[in-house]
Image (cartoon, rainbow, N blue to C red):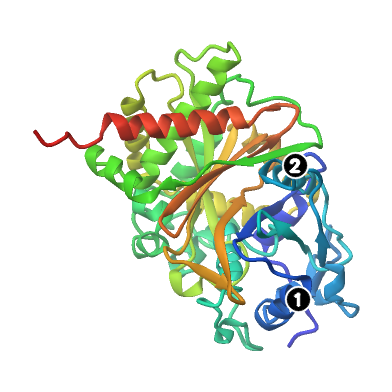
């Protein structure tokens, strides 16, 4: 194994995006129905987690020539701690603890991750996981966390000494060379519609279809600032985190089938309704309002799911918050997502991030602020396994990850499906959005009304 390894341009870009008001940390909670003690957790991590070399490496020289090196003083006890919740030690207290941790920066002198085990939580345990975005994107990190489970652990997925770090198909690697000026601007990029947003294999298969890189970049540069709503403004350090009750995935699919829409169209349409509900509750105007969101697009082929690093692009989606009818909101989202079918925006933004990682920090900061001004939220949907999982025999009740936000974006919405259920999580700036449960309430009400509107007619 090499003693050091340079960060890729895009990984370096995410490392340097850290800001006290917007830490580039992916936070997640795993709730276990059965109690787990700290000793069992540490044994599990030694067996199933530390085999991924990146979790024993720290970043050196982050500003000029960032590279990974094995931490010569690595100590698992510095990364795993046991704690207890105050008071009733229930869901409200867990929300508060997660919110507090979202504001805590990871120790840059050590490998950039931390886990906090709450041994006694509602008869079981809860595990708060924090991982820096420079280690990997949400898709890769969720897959790594799933490798902690009895059902998905496979030591053959640990990287070997000669692992090829290239995780992208040749067509998309060509795009990066285009952005960096190494080849002509004739490269063609990713396109596959909504399925490519959530299904990487479809996107890769059609990587040569779509608009030119130049057209995609021009579109991004010409975007105006997003609507002026309470979701935008000056950010502070304090964060808020919350999540919904479980939704039935079969019902989501039934609604989608009735509207000829994808699961993601339905869920993002419901999110648009939730944001409308929030504005109404705060006596804010909604007529004609669009809330632009950044949507991550996975560029990683399925066989590379367990290889760390960042391999995703971003597309902009205008959520039709100003549309009054909830069915029309879902259909409007479907239309906009379908329009992305011929777009190469995801590959273009990935290429921009890769290039920025090689520029001075000051240039990257200006670019992040520029693109951050174009959106009010980041929204992501990560599909999880549809089976009951266990960790050393302890049943995993639910998993909830939260997406970080770059620049001056103060709202993140995460959707995660697991074992036939879907949950939505909201992470936000506590100054901008002090009551994110209002968004959750709106989302749950929106979903219930969609299900009621589209329920099958009773038999006569």
Identify which residue is drawn at 71% across, 24% down.
233
Say whether residue 206 is left or right of residue 148.
left
Q: Position of residue 331 (x, y in %)?
A: 31, 32
Q: Position of residue 373 (x, y in %)?
A: 64, 31
**Mark 2, other Cα within 10 Å: few <14 / some 14–19 / many ≥20:** some
For label 2, the SS is helix
Residue that mark 2 sits on? 96
Identify which residue is drawn at 82% across, 57% down.
106
**424 or 177, nearer to the observer:** 424
Labelled pair 1, 2 in contact (Cβ < 8 Å): no
Q: Position of residue 40 (x, y in %)?
A: 72, 76
Say whether residue 366 is left or right of residue 210.
right
How far apart in space, not on screen, are marks 1 and 2 (Cα)?
A: 25 Å
The answer to whether 170 is drawn above or below residue 450 in the figure is below
Residue 42 - label: 1
**376 or 26, nearer to the observer:** 26
The answer to whether 404 is drawn above or below residue 112 in the figure is above
Say whether residue 187 is left or right of residue 79.
left
Quadrant of the image occupied by residue 312: bottom right
Identify which residue is drawn at 55% across, 77% down.
150
**183 or 377, nearer to the observer:** 377
Say whether residue 337 is left or right of residue 168.
left
Question: Mark 1 or 2 closer to N-term?
Answer: 1
Residue 359 - label: none
Quadrant for the C terminus, please. top left
Quadrant of the image occupied by residue 134: bottom right
């Amino acid at each position: 194994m090499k003693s050091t390894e340079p960060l890729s341009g895009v990984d370096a870009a995410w490392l340097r995006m850290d800001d006290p008001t917007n830490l580039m940390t992916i936070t997640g909670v795993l709730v276990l129905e059965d109690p787990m003690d700290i000793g069992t957790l540490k044994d599990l991590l030694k067996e199933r987690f530390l085999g991924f070399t990146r979790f024993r490496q720290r970043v050196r020289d982050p500003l000029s020539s960032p590279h990974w090196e094995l931490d010569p003083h690595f100590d698992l006890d510095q990364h795993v701690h046991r704690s207890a919740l105050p008071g009733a030690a229930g869901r409200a207290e867990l929300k508060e603890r997660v919110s507090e941790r979202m504001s805590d920066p990871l120790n840059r002198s050590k490998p950039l991750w931390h886990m906090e085990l709450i041994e006694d939580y509602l008869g079981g345990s809860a595990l708060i996981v924090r991982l820096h975005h420079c280690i990997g994107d949400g898709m890769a990190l969720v897959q790594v966390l799933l490798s902690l489970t009895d059902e998905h652990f496979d030591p053959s997925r640990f990287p070997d000494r000669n692992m090829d770090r290239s995780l992208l198909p040749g067509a998309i690697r060509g795009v990066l060379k285009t952005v960096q000026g190494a080849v002509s601007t004739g490269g063609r990029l990713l396109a596959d519609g909504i399925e490519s947003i959530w299904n990487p294999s479809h996107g890769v298969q059609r990587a040569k279809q779509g608009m030119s890189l130049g057209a995609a970049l021009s579109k991004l540069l010409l975007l105006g600032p997003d609507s002026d709503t309470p979701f935008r403004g000056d950010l502070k350090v304090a964060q808020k985190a919350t999540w919904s009750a479980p939704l039935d995935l079969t019902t989501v699919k039934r609604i989608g089938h009735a509207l000829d829409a994808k699961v993601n169209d339905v869920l993002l349409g419901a999110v648009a309704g939730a944001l409308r509900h929030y504005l109404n509750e705060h006596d804010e105007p909604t007529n004609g309002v669009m809330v632009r969101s950044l949507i991550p697009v996975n560029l990683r082929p399925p066989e590379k799911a367990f290889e760390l690093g960042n391999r995703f692009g971003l597309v902009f989606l205008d959520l039709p918050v100003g549309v009054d009818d909830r069915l029309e909101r879902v259909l409007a989202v479907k239309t906009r997502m379908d329009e992305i079918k011929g777009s190469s925006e995801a590959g273009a933004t990935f290429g921009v991030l890769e290039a920025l990682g090689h520029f001075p920090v000051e240039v990257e900061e200006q670019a992040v602020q520029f693109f951050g001004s174009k959106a009010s939220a980041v929204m992501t949907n990560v599909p999880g396994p549809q089976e009951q999982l266990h960790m050393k025999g302890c049943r995993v009740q639910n998993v909830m990850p939260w997406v970080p936000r770059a620049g001056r974006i103060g709202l993140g919405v995460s959707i995660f499906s697991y074992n036939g259920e879907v949950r939505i999580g909201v992470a936000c700036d506590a100054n901008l959005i002090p009551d994110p449960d209002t968004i959750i309430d709106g989302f749950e009400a929106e979903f219930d009304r969609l299900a009621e509107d589209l329920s099958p007619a009773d038999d006569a």
